Amino acid sequence: MSRTARTVGALVAATALLLSGCVDVDSTPSSETQTEPASAERSTEGSGGPGDLLPGAEGTSQPTADDAIDDRPAADPTDTDPTDTDPTDTDPTDTDPTDDDQSEQPELGAPGIPACDLLDLPATALPVIEDIEAGGPYDYPRNDGVHFQNREGILPDEDRDFYREFTVETPGLDHRGPRRIVTGGFEETDPEHWYFTEDHYESFCEFDPDRAEVG
């Protein structure tokens, strides 16, 4: 073979080799082209609706300020203001209503006439008091319920029809005895004053049948 023929053959071979290399470069996919579909697949994999992702998973949205407010612990409804007052507290200036009732009751006893308690009277006085409040009948109808003249002047001076006297029997005696209840007031069954004498009008004490000191 001549030198010229060998040169031409070498050029043809080199041209063929060069052409084959270009074809390989164009047909080989680039790294970017190969990685893009995988990235797309990963981005779509597991991308379900809201709430499908577990906490901390890829793609979870960052908490917002509203979420932080919602996560704050709720206030305990049992907590109370330390300044609240006990509804059971009462005003120390409040007074016992029974004190007013006692203050409204009239004082017993006139000048020279002491007060006495119902329980200090003899037992035979109690049925007489009941008969007076019932308007009778009395054990001594001719003597009980008659007007007492107050000639001794020991009781307060009143009209002649103001006082009435009633017999309180003394056990062991066969007569009326010295004990009496004298009432004052114009209403026979609801007297304003009650007096007791155990020595036939020489001394008196005033009592109230509705008031008795027990204990």
Image (spheres, grey):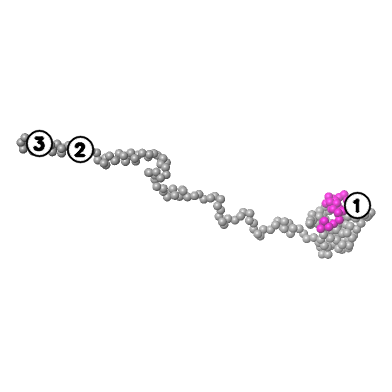
Q: Amino acid at mark 1?
A: Tyr
Q: CA distance from mark 3 to mark 1?
A: 177 Å
**Residue corresponding to mark 1:** 140
Q: Amino acid at mark 3?
A: Gly
- Look at the numbered disc 2 and give the secondary structure of its residue: helix
Q: CA distance from mark 3 to mark 2?
A: 23 Å
Residue 9 is marked as 3
- Look at the numbered disc 1 and give the secondary structure of its residue: loop
From the viewer's perspective, tell me whether residue 130 is left or right of residue 9: right
Q: Amino acid at mark 2?
A: Asp
Residue at 59%, 56% (x, y): give it.
Answer: 85
**Residue corresponding to mark 2:** 24
Seen from this angle, which residue lies furthest top? 1
Residue at 33%, 39% (x, y): give it.
Answer: 41
Indicate the position of residue 12 as horizontal and vertical percent values: 11, 36
177 within the magenta span: no
**Residue range (magenta):** 117-141
The image quadrant where one finds the C terminus is bottom right
Label 1 environment density (alpha carbons within 10 Å; few <14, some 14–19, many ≥20): few
From the viewer's perspective, tell me whether residue 3 is left or right of residue 131: left
Indicate the position of residue 50 as horizontal and vertical percent values: 41, 41
Seen from this angle, which residue lies furthest front? 1
